[in-house]
Amino acid sequence: MILVTGATGKLGKLVIESLVARGTPASDIVAGVRSPEKAADLADQGVVVRKADYSDPATLTTALEGVKRVVLVSSSEVGQRLPQHQNVINAAKEAGVELIAYTSLLNATESPMILAQEHVGTEKALTESGIPHVLLRNSWYNENYTENLSLALEHGAVLGSAKDGKFASATRADYAEAAAVAVSTEGHAGKTYELAGSTAYTLTEYAQYVSELSGKAVIYQDLPAEEYTKVLVGVGLPEGFAAVLADSDVGTSNGALYSDSKDLETLIGRPSTPIQDSIKAAL
């Protein structure tokens, strides 16, 4: 059986969809979720739903019964990720899991981004556990921008602190498909995949694409990181997380979210989804 953690989250749910689409029987998939009542749609498809709370080791032990492979979708709780992931790794070792596929961050070990630190710690914990594993180092999601497209159109501007740094992003569905391939086919244990989009863009180029496709004038406005942090707090983000996002933009200006790796294309057997396609879908 294959366990997917965070299975009611946006990425986890897509991993399950991709596993089923690629031929894994729903009854061989365990959806690990914090709140099983929110996973009724998965249960209706025949997926096994089990409580699996990153912060509650007892639930992880139960969730892993009979499981041989795990997609460890990184926790959304920045600052709590490492101990939460360690709980999953400990439970997986106890359960005799044969492979963990972990969703890490592009260029993690070289990345200057604050966001990379917990990923690097998790990669180290996986190595120390002795469990065979594959590292899926995801770049940014196209949706990080297209989900906020209405704001850019409303204000006529995309804001950030990335200067001319390039984002080699792809859709969540692209990364989910890569995870499904890595956990359901052979030959991936011990591999580190740098999963970058087939095409890359600066935020100036992104703003140009939005303008061309929407017919509304949109520009990119580059801000100092401190000012961008304040803007993000102003739209409702917690200050700590806003600072992490601004720091990620600064890291991007130094190449942190760019790679010319073709690992993603190779795993999914096609080019990743261009940002222009995601913009069109969001309009």
Image (cartoon, grey):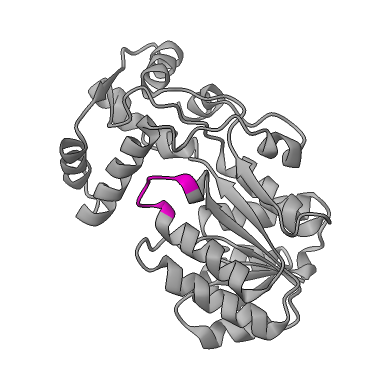
- Give left or right: position of 76 versus 24: left
Residue 138 at x, y = what percent? Answer: 55, 46
Q: Position of residue 82 (x, y in %)?
A: 44, 68
Determine the residue located farthest toward the bottom in the rendered image.
58
Determine whether 108 is above or below 279 in the image: below
Question: Magenta region, mostly helix, strand or loop?
Answer: loop
Q: Is residue 238 left or right of residue 188?
A: left
**Residue 164 drawn above or below residue 71:** above
Horizontally, is 165 left or right of 277 in the view? Answer: left
Of residues 97 and 21, the one nearer the viewer is 97
Look at 74% across and 58% down and name the residue there: 183
Number of numbered discs: 0
Which residues make up the magenta segment?
110-116
Left or right: residue 39 compared with residue 111: right
Q: Position of residue 159 (x, y in %)?
A: 27, 29
Q: Quadrant location of the C terminus?
A: top left
Nearest the viewer among 269 and 24 is 269
Residue at x 63%, y 49% (from the top left corner): 176
In the picture shown, does residue 58 fall above or below 258? below
Q: From this viewpoint, is residue 172 visible?
A: yes
Place residue 212 in its image quadrant: top left
